[in-house]
Structure formats: C-alpha cells, structure tokens
Image (tube, coloured by chain):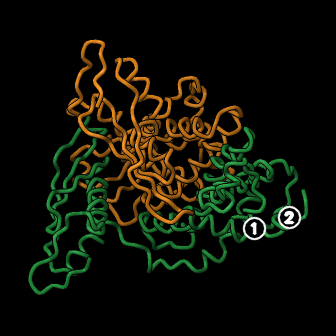
Chain colours: A orange, B green
Amino acid sequence: MNKVHAEFCRRLNYTFTDPTQLERALTHRSKSKNNYERLEFLGDSVLNFVISAELYDRYPALSEGDLTRLRASLVKKESLAALARGLGLGELLTLGSGELKSGGFERDSILADSLEAVLGAVYKDGGIHKAAPVILQLYREALAQLNPEAIPKDPKTQLQEILQKQSFPTPIYNVLEIIGEPHNQMFVVECRVAPLASAVRGEGSSRRTAEQQAAARALKMLSSPSSGAQPPRGNVPTNH
Amino acid sequence: MNKVHAEFCRRLNYTFTDPTQLERALTHRSKSKNNYERLEFLGDSVLNFVISAELYDRYPALSEGDLTRLRASLVKKESLAALARGLGLGELLTLGSGELKSGGFERDSILADSLEAVLGAVYKDGGIHKAAPVILQLYREALAQLNPEAIPKDPKTQLQEILQKQSFPTPIYNVLEIIGEPHNQMFVVECRVAPLASAVRGEGSSRRTAEQQAAARALKMLSSPSSGAQPPRGNVPTNH
C-alpha cells in the first residue's frame, strides 16, 4: 500500500486487514485474471442490501415502488461513478494497456464497477458490520439530499402526463399474447401513442409490468430525436 | 398466531419476537394497505445478499457471470414459489376476495413475493445474523443440488454453439453506433446470423453487454416458430 492507497482508505474510512482484497478490487479484467469482477458481484449485493435496509427505515410511508426508484437513483452507474471520483478511485485503477490508452480510468462503468468491488472487499475483509457503516458514510450526502417528493413517476404515469401536456390522447394498451401455464405467465402487450408511427411492445410476468415496460420504451422513443415522433399539430389530437 | 402459523415458523426455523411482522408478510395488497410489498422490497435485497455471499465462498473458481447465473436460478420466481409451497405458505396468505376466487394462494408470483417478504420480516425481527441462517437452511437442498457444470452458457456462446451444430457460419457482430460522452457510452450493435433474415440489434453500456443482448435476442428468435428463421441447407438436419 502506497500513500495514494492510504489516502483512499482514509476517505473510505476503512483500514484493510488484508490489502490484497483492495488491490484486486482495483484491478480491471484487461490487466489480470485476478480482477475485480467476482468482488463486484459480491459488492453489488452488499450495497443493495445496505441501501435497501436504510431506505426501508428512513421512509416508513413510501411504497415499494417508490423505495425501488429511490434505491435505483442511489446505486446507478452514474451515482457510483461520482462517488468513486470523490474517493479518487480512478488514480488507483490497474488497467491493461488498451484500456489505459482509451481512458478507462475515467469511464463511468469501470469506476462504478470497481467501487462496488471495493465495497465487496470491505465486506470480505471486515464483515457486514464493518461494510454497512462504510457504505452509509459514503452515501451520507446523497442520502441527506434524497427528495422522495422528486421521485420520478412510473413510466405509464410519465407517458400519460407528457401526452396530455401536448394535447395528445392517452396511450392505448392492448394485450397481444399470454404465454405459459396459468401459474406462471408471460404477458406481451403493445402500447399505442399518437406521436409514434408504430406500436411499442412490452413483456412481463404480469400485465402491469408488461405495460410499464412498453411505456418506458415509448418514453425513450419519444425523447430520442431519431424516433420518428411527430410534433403535435394544432390543438387537435391525431388518433392512431 | 394459530397452530398453522406455528407449524410454518417451525419449518422456517424461526420464532418471531413480533408476530405482526409475519402477519404483514403474508398479507396481499388485495386485502389491506398493510401488505407485504415493502417487506418484499427489503427481503429481496436480504435474500440476494445472503445467497451472493454464500455462492462467492462456495465457488472460488467461478466467474462473475457464472455466479450471477447460479444466483438467478436460486432466487427466480419459480424456485421461491417451490420453497414457499414446501413451507405451506399458501394456506397462510391473507388475500382479498378477488384474488381468493382466482386462486391467488397458489400463484407463483404471489407465493414468491410473500416468501421474500417473510425473509424481510425475519431480518426486521432478528437482524442479519438471524436471517442469514434461516435463508441458508431454506436453501440447503437447492444449494446442495446446484451443479455449476450445468450453468447455462452466456448467450453469445450458446448462439455460436447452436449455429455450429447446424453447420452455419459463426455470427457476425458489428458496432452500429456509440452514443453519449466518452465517460458514459451506450453501444448499439447488430448480430448477423445466417438463419435469420435480418440483423438483430442489442444495446448496452459496453460492447460486450450489447453483443450479449443481441445474441440473446437472436437465440429467442431462432427458438420461436414465427421467427422467419430459414432451415439450414444441404445435408444438415432441420432442428426446429
């Protein structure tokens, strides 16, 4: 462990009994077979558990859907990468020459994955009672700034609101197919919205999740400039 | 707590200090606002963590991808529902009249979700040091029967093997587009396979994940009778 590693551990607020765990958590697959991927698998589940338990306690009135959205905002790649940058993780990464040249040390996905691996390493080194406070301290500011009022709405609600604002009719959902045995079904639905030329499909183990997936895809297509979406005409909605 | 609940707890190998946690874990949203959904959110993350840590220790030689596939096979809806049935969970469910009539107590999704909630309730009631052994005992047989040799291969490997078996050339992957800033990119790739008339697209935050997604879609299309897949030519047997 050199000075930069020591500074990293100080910021993380954790001292490794076995520093090889940390080394591995900072090693990309382009460099070595002994890389961070297994620790990332472990760390991801530790992080998810600690954040879930914290949100469950903090927000006793929030629904499961809102808790899921809050958690997603905390553990998504961009959030993890920002935390990794705050810890100076990029400087410590061990990368293969190709990744080094292409700037892998500043790529969100590598920073996020390696930080998850570091959390996995803390857990392996010290157990859950050491890992939980490290995670909660790392997320202290992000948790303090969480605003449950600002939780993005579910895709179906978002889609409906966007269309209403533009004076389009509300989306139409149709079940196209139900596959599988009664106790274990897969629903295939379509969502038709006026500004998109063709229907958008969604799949899921319930009608509700399939419709949410279709709505999420429709939202994505509406927000993409190459979607073929037509601007609203006058104040008269076009019906498809 | 009646006799049936006591028998359930005996099978689960856990005695609740606060039985209202268990009651809530067995109550469906069709019956009450005080239902299992929040506990399910919590229990899902506890289960995921305990199983991940166990697999990480049990299989030091397995890759992250293989660990992920093993975990998925253990925590998928069907596996959870089977465990719930073994505990007699269905009899204890509190459902609204609609769900009761339509047989909700034997539906995989409700059984699986409620069992996750029960595990969340154990965690809330006794902490992670009580919940972990309950989970590992519940999964004892499933863990003993796990066969890492039988882990399904990743989609790209599967696709390649299927095509080789049918004497088709190997799939061709092309990057169509890289969207976004260098630190946060989205790759759009296509996968061309001989038996499919048109290329199949995949998206992901890395070239690797985008290719896997495209391969997964191609596999799905090849196995679907309406895929438009053409039978191999020559003396190769048609395997549809």
Q: Label 1 neighbourhood size at 10 Å, few (<14), some (14-19), many (20+)?
A: some
Q: Nearer the viewer, residue B172 or A103?
A: B172
The answer to whether residue B60 is seen in the rendering is yes
Query: Disc 1 and disc 2: Cα gap in Å?
Result: 9 Å
- Name which quarter of the figure residue B145 lies in: bottom right
The count of marks equals: 2
The residue positioned farthest toward the left in the image shown = B234
- Tag 1: residue type? Gly
Q: Quadrant of the N terminus of chain B?
A: bottom right
- Name which quarter of the figure residue B85 lies in: bottom right
The answer to whether residue A127 is seen in the rendering is no
- Tag 2: residue type? Val
Q: Which residue is mark 2?
A: B4
Circle nearer the N terminus (1, 2): 2
Q: Residue, x 68% and y 44% (percent of image)? A: B29
Q: Are marks 1 and 2 on the same chain?
A: yes
Residue A174: which numbered mark, if any?
A: none
The residue positioned farthest toward the bottom in the image shown = B235
Residue B78 appears at what percent x and percent y?
56, 66
* Element class at badge 1: loop
Q: Nearer the viewer, residue A213 or B152?
A: A213
Whether the residues at callouts 1 and 2 have beta carbons within 8 Å, the answer is yes
Tell me the chain of label 1. Answer: B
Above or below, A149 relative to A185: above
Above or below, A97 relative to A74: below
- Asked whether, in this view, residue A106 is left or right of residue B109, the answer is left
* Element class at badge 2: helix
Q: Label 2 neighbourhood size at 10 Å, few (<14), some (14-19), many (20+)?
A: few
The residue positioned farthest toward the top in the image shown = A234
Tell me the chain of label 2. Answer: B
Above or below, B180 relative to A2: above
Q: Which residue is mark 1?
A: B88
